[in-house]
Amino acid sequence: MSERRRGHGEAGAPHGVADRRAAGGTRTDQKRQAITQAATGLFLRQGYEGTSMDEIAAAAAVSKQTVYKQFTDKEQLFATIVTAITERAERIAETINALVDEIVDLEAGLVQLARAYTTAVVQPPVVQLRRLVISEADRFPVLARTYYQRAPARGIAALAGGLERLAGRQLLRIDDATTAAEQFAYLVLGPVIDRALFDPGAPIEDSEIARYAAAGVRVFVAAYT
């Protein structure tokens, strides 16, 4: 008799299980995802203190008991959402590395890098989460430190590694790659991220990102070549 029995999918899994996996995991996984998505939206709109577990359960279309079954309390749920930024930060680091390795014309390549980096960091969900973490840093200092290490600091580390590789190709003269990366980041990103954080109603235009990228790179290249 065949190992794949009727009514079962690959590796003997029932068709229902296989279908749920294809659709995004088990029902438990799907409920957990619905809870985190609902909580993220509420936390970003209303803040930590202004959001209740009752509201999260209602927005996720699950019972409050289900929320507590997945997450011990609101603090754990908040921590889960904040630390999930790791995945986005990894994508930003991957973009930085890819763009650095493609650079032939130094200034033009750094401008492209600056524009991509700034655009990724000032995306509304990223800015909203950063603003939320800052507002709750006194309440959750360890979580705020973790966010910093996994998001902003990871971007700086990727920039530092990329600049070191450019120095190895004799395109830059760098003694301290981390300092150079921090200076690069603040030259091209500083004014834009400040605007995004403190004036949420004002859109960040591509032309503004391009202007700061070009101006910042000119200063950086003058200092490091």
Image: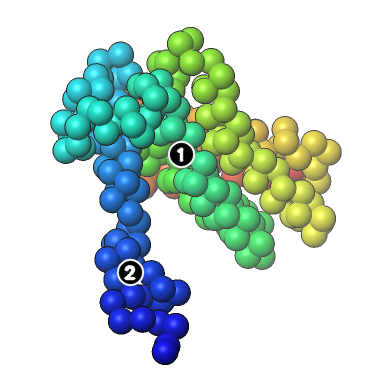
Q: Which residue is rendered at x = 33% and y = 58% of the image?
A: 24
In the depicted structure, whether residue 221 falls above or below residue 3: above
Q: Which residue is rendered at x = 38% and y = 29% of the image?
A: 71
Q: Which residue is rendered at x = 76% and y = 40% of the image?
A: 177
Q: Which residue is rendered at x = 57% and y = 23% of the image?
A: 145
Q: Answer whether residue 96 is visible to the viewer in this image.
A: yes
Horizontal side of 32 relative to 112 (left or right) equals: left
Image coordinates of residue 110 in percent, x first then y, are: 60, 52
Q: Quadrant of the N terminus?
A: bottom left
Horizontal side of 209 relative to 214 (left or right) equals: left
Image coordinates of residue 161 in percent, x first then y, are: 72, 48
Horizontal side of 172 relative to 33 (left or right) equals: right
Q: Secondary structure at mark 2?
A: loop
Mark 1 nearby-residue class (10 Å; few <14, some 14–19, many ≥20): some
Q: Amino acid at mark 1?
A: Ala
Residue topped by disc 1: 84
In this view, the residue farthest toward the bottom is: 1
